[in-house]
Image: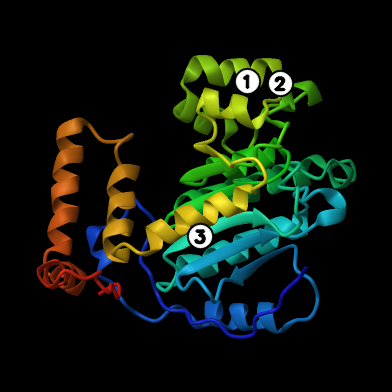
Amino acid sequence: MFRVYKHHHLTSLGRPPKQAHSSFRAHHRGPKELRHALTRAFASQIPHEAFFEPLPEHPGITCLSLNRPAAKNAISTNLLKELRESLAIVHADRSVRALILRSSTPGSFCAGADLVERRTMTDAQVSQFLTDLRDAMGRLEGLPMPTICAIDGPALGGGLEMAMACDLRVASSTVEKIGLPETGLGIIPGAGGTQRAARLLGQSKAKDLIFTGRLLTASQALEWGLVDYVSDPGTTAFDKALSLAIMIARNAPLAVRAAKHAISRAEDLPLEAGLDFERATYNLLIPSSDRLEALQAFREKRRPIFKGE
């Protein structure tokens, strides 16, 4: 069901992971064009193919929903455009403590690129699409808040690449098709699949997954390390993703973002440089109001109230 939200608080939340430490302390208003884009998006009554669903009962948690049910959320040029716009907007929203990527349709996630549309594209258009898709995956991976992918249906090709760009992945126990089948179509994963799968699974398993084009069930994906959780029978991946988001959102948002920032540098820094980066990031949190609130709450034996300051 498409839901329209006309208003949503928007302020700055910092820069992508590899930029200066000071990004965690920055607090300036987001660019006007982003605020206007958000207003236009949610004021429209036309169903969007990628849109936000804030959860009023869970402050700080927002869903980014894929909404092409007739095409199993296959990634069209328009869906990709709206996804990139949405990611730019949420990157600049300090109020979001956790983001859940999901399908708006129960029992679905993303079937990959829209092959019907692909057949009508020129080589130049395909190349531009891949450039934009890679950009979208980079934006998703570079979000400063934790991201959780709720896989409640098949995650194929670009759909799995999208999931791998998230911090955590949860699959429904009923999902039977998770994989990168591109070699069966005469191509290879083109939005980071070869690189993220190798980093996530190790080169041997990534080669197996891509060379064979095999499709994994949710339980197999868990064994391989492709997903982090499988939902309990009778529940959805979104249910589990939401429970994780709630756990994350109750912690100090500056600290959570700082932790993501530091962990994200682990793969490209030598250990000693990584330890120095961790210490420098830690030092930024020492004067924060949230840290002082945590100490006061511990003394008073109560749960701290974090404000992201």
Q: Position of residue 173 (x, y in %)?
A: 65, 37
The residue labelled by disc 1 is 209
**In this rendering, would 159 be left or right of 263?**
right
What's under tag 1, amino acid-wise?
A: Leu
Disc 2 versus disc 3: nearer the observer: 3
Residue picked out by circle 3 = 99
Position of 196 with respect to 38 (left or right) is left
Q: Disc 1 or 3, which lies upstream in sequence?
A: 3
Amino acid type of the residue tagged 3 in the rendering: Leu
Specify whether 126 is left or right of 250: right
Sort mark 3 into few (<14), some (14-19) or many (20+) by Cα contacts within 10 Å.
many
Q: Would you name the residue on which mark 2 appears?
A: 213
Q: How would you rate the neighbour count of disc 2 (Cα within 10 Å): few for under 14, some for 14-19, many for 20 or more?
A: some
Q: CA distance from mark 2 to mark 1?
A: 6 Å
Placement of 265 over or under 282, stated as above or below = above
Instruction: For marks 1 and 3, give the CA distance.
Output: 28 Å
Q: Relative to 122, is 69 above or below?
A: below
Quarter residue 19 falls in: bottom left
Quadrant for residue 284, please give it.
Answer: bottom left
Q: Secondary structure at mark 3?
A: strand
Q: Amino acid at mark 2?
A: Gly
Q: Quadrant of residue 153?
A: top right
For the C terminus, the quadrant is bottom left
Say which label, 2 or 3, has the lower sequence index: 3
Q: Is residue 145 visible?
A: no
Residue drawn at 79 percent across, 40 percent down: 123
Residue 242: horizontal and vertical position, in percent?
A: 53, 57
